[in-house]
């Protein structure tokens, strides 16, 4: 239907419009509307027909919204064939089409908390409620599957259909009858309901989806892009057994229609949406049960949505947002409908997890241990709330297994807090100008031939004098995790290294701050700040210093364990392999690497120089937590910090609390004893207040408590 070149062009125009760099303004509205219409239809084809989308849902929504906007400003441009004039359709000619009892509408979308407040205000306006009255909302996950409408007559499932264009959908009765989660009979008659239509979503669990794809791979079949495609495809097969085999499940989230023997509407018999869902649960349907919450007021809705945004990845099913519904049926009626969506409901869409972009180049970075990491440079795109421009490609094998080329369009994903990664290249969009990624044979910095240690995925530069490796070690030395020298960072390390001022760790403690003050981009104040940051670092506990040495595999935890057992860093000169191995949790590799480091005369010479420059080598109270008095005011208590602390970093505060015998928790629950609130504390504070037994302290009160302890 679309040639490869055409697809290429359409995708490029989509990107231009999505990146919004003045391209839209360069067109007259009629041209822009035409382009948007064509793009939307193209992406719908990729999505619905060939099941292989090139852009994320989020990007699709943006294109759609843009068209709506143009048409709103220029109503003369609205044509009947515009995608905005129909509800999107998944009707193919294969299955018989049936009319829904009432139209299956869409939902209005919101993307941030402000939109929710606006929705709440709108509901107030429509219902005549004043700003002090609290509106109840029923909030449930927005399931990311295929919507279905199921009709029961005289307690028997008589018909099921896909959403189709909202007015009519495809008849999938037999397929729905094969699903275990939809009862074939349900006692609606107990509630005098003679005919009902239920709305819901057909879904596949995420783990089941992985199993299906693994099997398809084995069978040499095309893989499904996501659980939704597997579910919607499964609903519309001609073979009910195939639907059942995919283990499709259906959540029912709406009672759309209900009449009694006389044909009277019974929907208002139940006073809230929540009650109607409860009733459907009792009748044996799968409903959002634990996941559904009646919230009092829009602020409770906000925190519930945020909570779900955080935990969405751990949910068994894919969800792409939350749906917020006015709970009271009478209020719903007062709100009414547009031709597109109910005015009493809104979807809160989570930030996009996927996006596409072009791979411009691959750089090969050298780590502090010499490992070479290929890093993809992509055209910057928005992904789950952050702009992404560089993405690790991990190692050579990763690149080979995914057939990625320079110039490719690639699909990126960032799930939850996970670092963004490249899911796949989109080879359909290749122009022929793509180039293979050539993995270097020599170190990009010192040209030494790279080596690969057996059993490791990474290629390494074996040269201990490699300039970039040295710089990486210095960058790590000053980083937050190690000596934590505020204001030093990568760019200053590189600058001072270029100037010949820093060639090794000792040089960091012997800088000429007058010379720094005279550097371009510095000045007295920033030189002073750097000086005091270095002075502060000189007093660090020795576990930080140990960790900062970049001894291969010696991490934070092992550094702490070793530091607990010595009085001075130099004690390690005498340590044998056995001394290390006596420590539980320290393995032979760390033991040998650390022993070797402290028996190398070059290292000892460097350490002596560092010590002579005033860096603390003696163990401190923080290194020996056993010294901390057992009985302190915080001892045995659970504690949590929320909001922005102004006098110390969150991590430091947690360490302090831990040293004082408290246990840090990550969430507010009835197990929490103390909540320390910084600025802009949000839902955690609210929740703690609600629990009632949590002691709430300001940052100053916490500090006072700590001083009191000392
Ligand atoms: S209520 C009149 N609730 O979202 C009420 N819809 O654009 C309209 N969806 O395709 C729908 N989870 O299938 C509602 N808990 C939920 C939902 C939900 C997913 C889907 C629905 C429709 C789309 C709305």
Image (spheres, rainbow, N blue to C red):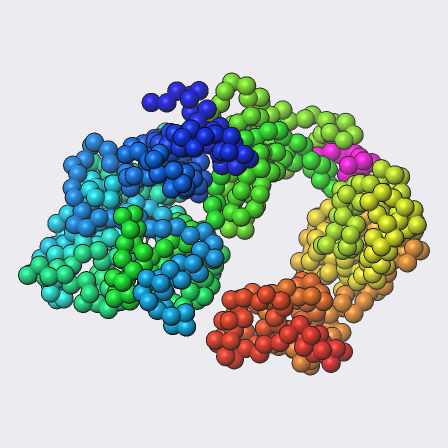
Vertical placement of residue 166 versus 481, above or below:
above
Q: Residue at x 33, y 22 (%)?
A: 1
Q: Residue at x 14, y 54 (%)?
A: 152
Q: Residue at x 28, y 34 (%)?
A: 80
Where does residue 501 sit, x and y in percent of width and height?
Answer: 89, 43
> Does residue 704 appear in the picture of this structure?
yes
Where does residue 339 sit, x and y in percent of width and height?
Answer: 27, 48
- Residue extending furthest top? 432
The magenta span reads 460-470
Q: Residue at x 84, y 47 (%)?
A: 522
Locate the C terminus by quadrant: bottom right
Q: Nearer the viewer, residue 665 or 43?
A: 43
Residue 463 on the magenta segment: yes
Vertical placement of residue 58 versus 705, above or below:
above
Q: Nearer the viewer, residue 548 or 583?
A: 548
> Does residue 175 appear in the picture of this structure?
no
Where does residue 356 sit, x and y in percent of width and height?
Answer: 49, 35
């Amino acid at each position: 239907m679309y040639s490869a070149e055409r697809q290429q062009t359409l995708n490029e125009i989509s990107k231009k419009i999505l990146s919004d760099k003045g391209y839209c303004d360069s067109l007259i509205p009629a041209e822009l509307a035409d382009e948007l219409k064509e793009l939307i239809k193209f992406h719908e084809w990729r999505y619905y027909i060939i099941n292989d989308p090139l852009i994320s849902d989020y990007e699709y929504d943006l294109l759609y919204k843009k068209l709506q906007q143009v048409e709103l400003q220029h109503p003369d441009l609205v044509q009947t064939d515009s995608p905005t004039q129909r509800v999107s359709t998944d009707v193919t000619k294969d299955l018989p089409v049936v009319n829904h009892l009432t139209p299956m509408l869409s939902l209005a979308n919101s993307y941030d908390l402000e939109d929710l407040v606006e929705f709440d205000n709108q509901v107030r306006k429509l219902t005549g409620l004043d700003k002090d009255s609290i509106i109840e909302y029923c909030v449930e996950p927005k399931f990311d599957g295929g919507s279905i409408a199921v009709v029961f007559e005289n307690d028997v499932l008589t018909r099921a259909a896909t959403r189709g264009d909202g007015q009519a959908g495809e008849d999938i009765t037999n397929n729905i009858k094969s699903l275990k989660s939809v009862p074939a009979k349900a006692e609606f008659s107990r509630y005098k309901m003679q005919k009902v239509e239920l709305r819901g979503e057909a879904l596949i669990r995420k783990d089941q989806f992985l199993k299906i794809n693994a099997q398809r791979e084995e069978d040499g079949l095309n893989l499904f892009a996501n659980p939704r495609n597997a579910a919607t495809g499964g609903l519309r097969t001609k073979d009910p057994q195939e639907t059942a085999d995919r283990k499709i499940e259906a959540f029912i989230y709406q009672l759309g229609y209900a009449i009694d023997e006389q044909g009277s509407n019974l929907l208002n018999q139940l006073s809230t949406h929540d009650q109607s869902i409860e009733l459907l649960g009792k009748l044996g349907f799968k409903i959002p049960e634990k996941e559904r919450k009646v919230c009092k007021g829009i602020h409770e809705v906000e925190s519930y949505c945020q909570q779900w945004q955080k935990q969405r990845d751990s949910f068994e099913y894919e969800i792409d947002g939350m749906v917020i519904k006015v709970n009271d049926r009478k209020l719903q009626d007062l709100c009414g409908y547009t031709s597109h969506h109910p005015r009493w409901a809104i979807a809160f869409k989570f930030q996009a997890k996927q996006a596409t972009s072009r791979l411009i180049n691959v750089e090969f970075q050298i780590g502090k241990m010499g490992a070479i990491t290929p890093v993809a440079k992509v055209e910057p795109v928005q992904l789950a709330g952050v702009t992404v421009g560089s993405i690790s490609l991990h190692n050579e094998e990763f690149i080979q297994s995914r057939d990625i080329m320079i110039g490719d369009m690639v699909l990126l994903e960032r799930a939850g807090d996970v670092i963004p990664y490249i899911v796949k290249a989109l080879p359909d969009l290749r122009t022929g100008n793509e180039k293979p990624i050539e993995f270097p044979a020599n170190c990009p910095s010192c040209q030494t031939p790279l080596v690969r240690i057996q059993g490791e995925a990474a290629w390494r530069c074996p040269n201990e004098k490699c300039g970039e490796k040295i710089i990486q070690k210095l960058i790590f030395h000053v980083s937050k995790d190690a000596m934590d020298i505020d204001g030093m960072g990568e760019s200053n390390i590189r600058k001072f290294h270029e100037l010949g001022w820093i060639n090794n760790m000792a040089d960091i403690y012997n800088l000429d701050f007058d010379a720094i003050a005279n550097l371009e981009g510095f000045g007295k104040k920033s030189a002073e700040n750097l000086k005091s940051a270095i002075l502060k670092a000189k007093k660090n506990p020795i576990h930080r210093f140990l960790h900062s040495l970049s001894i291969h595999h010696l991490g934070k935890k092992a550094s702490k364990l070793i530091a607990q057992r010595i009085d001075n860093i130099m004690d390690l000169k005498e340590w044998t392999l056995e001394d290390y191995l006596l420590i539980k949790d320290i393995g032979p590799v760390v033991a040998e690497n650390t022993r070797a480091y402290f028996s190398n005369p070059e290292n000892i010479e460097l350490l002596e120089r560092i010590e002579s420059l005033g860096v603390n080598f003696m163990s401190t109270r923080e290194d020996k937590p056993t010294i901390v008095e057992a009985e302190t005011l915080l001892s045995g208590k659970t504690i949590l910090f929320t909001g922005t602390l102004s006098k110390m970093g969150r991590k430091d505060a947690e360490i302090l609390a831990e040293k004082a015998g408290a246990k840090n928790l990550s969430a507010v629950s009835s197990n929490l004893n103390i909540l320390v609130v910084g600025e802009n504390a949000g839902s955690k504070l609210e929740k703690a207040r609600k629990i009632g037994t949590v002691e709430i302290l300001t940052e100053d009160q916490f500090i006072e408590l700590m001083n009191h302890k000392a």
